[in-house]
Image (spheres, rainbow, N blue to C red):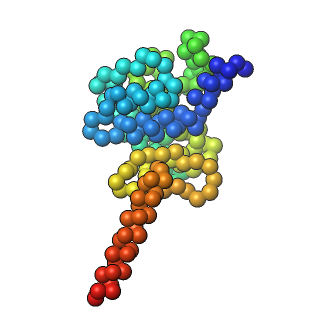
Amino acid sequence: MSSHSDDWSTRHSVLTTARRSAALINALSGDRPDPTGVADVLRAYGEPEPIDLDPDEVASMREAATLLRQVFAAEHTDEAAAVLNSLLQEHTGPLRLTSHRGSAPWHPHLDRDDDAPWGEWLLASSCMALTVLVWDRQRPPGRICASPSCRNVFISQGSGPERRYCSRRCATRERVAAHRRSHAAEQLSECT
């Protein structure tokens, strides 16, 4: 296998595609996602140039991200599978193979065609990756950060205790806040 093909396979692995989905969902959150920020995420995950997103494309991607967030909100595997089944049935095309006109190795797609709009592409490629993760791990593929000040989505990884926060920064911030609340409660009870 050529190094070009190996590079492509690494960039487009199921886990990398799922991480890209989470990063795009986070970049598309809020009332007015920044098209430049969304394009930067696409570039960071190896999407080819040119990436010039207009406001309608970003709005379409934001709608897809809103639907996909439901998968990350699922508490249990059955719930994540039900959400994915619904999204697959209502919003994706039949499974097909593509090589993007010979510019990439053959791989599966669920969007209509290689020139599908960005929103359709995001929903279809994300559903594919998240479905494979549920199948492979038999648990929800990710979570929404438990920090009330964050709410980013993240992909769960590996074995061990389930993560509650998207990053160490969020976990530390919440631990410090809990410690301060506990310390303040102790001081208050000492004063009474």
Residue appearing at x 63%, y 24% in the figure: 7
Eyeballing the image, is 161 above or below 126?
below
Tally of marks:
0
How far across and down, in percent of the image, does residue 157 sit?
Answer: 58, 48
How far across and down, in percent of the image, does residue 106 sit?
Answer: 62, 19
Eyeballing the image, is 14 above or below 134?
above
Q: As drawn, which residue projects farthest toward the bottom?
A: 192
How far across and down, in percent of the image, does residue 119 sit?
Answer: 39, 27
Quarter-of-image position of residue 136: top right
How far across and down, in percent of the image, does residue 6 sit?
Answer: 66, 24
Quarter-of-image position of residue 98: top right
Residue appearing at x 54%, y 48% in the figure: 156
Residue appearing at x 58%, y 59% in the figure: 161
- In the image, 175 versus 51, the foreground residue is 175
Q: As drawn, which residue projects farthest toward the right?
A: 1
- The answer to whether residue 92 shows anywhere in this view is no
Residue appearing at x 41%, y 29% in the figure: 40
- The answer to whether residue 107 shows anywhere in this view is yes
Eyeballing the image, is 82 above or below 43?
below
Eyeballing the image, is 160 above or below 179?
above
The quadrant of the picture occupied by the C terminus is bottom left
The quadrant of the picture occupied by the N terminus is top right
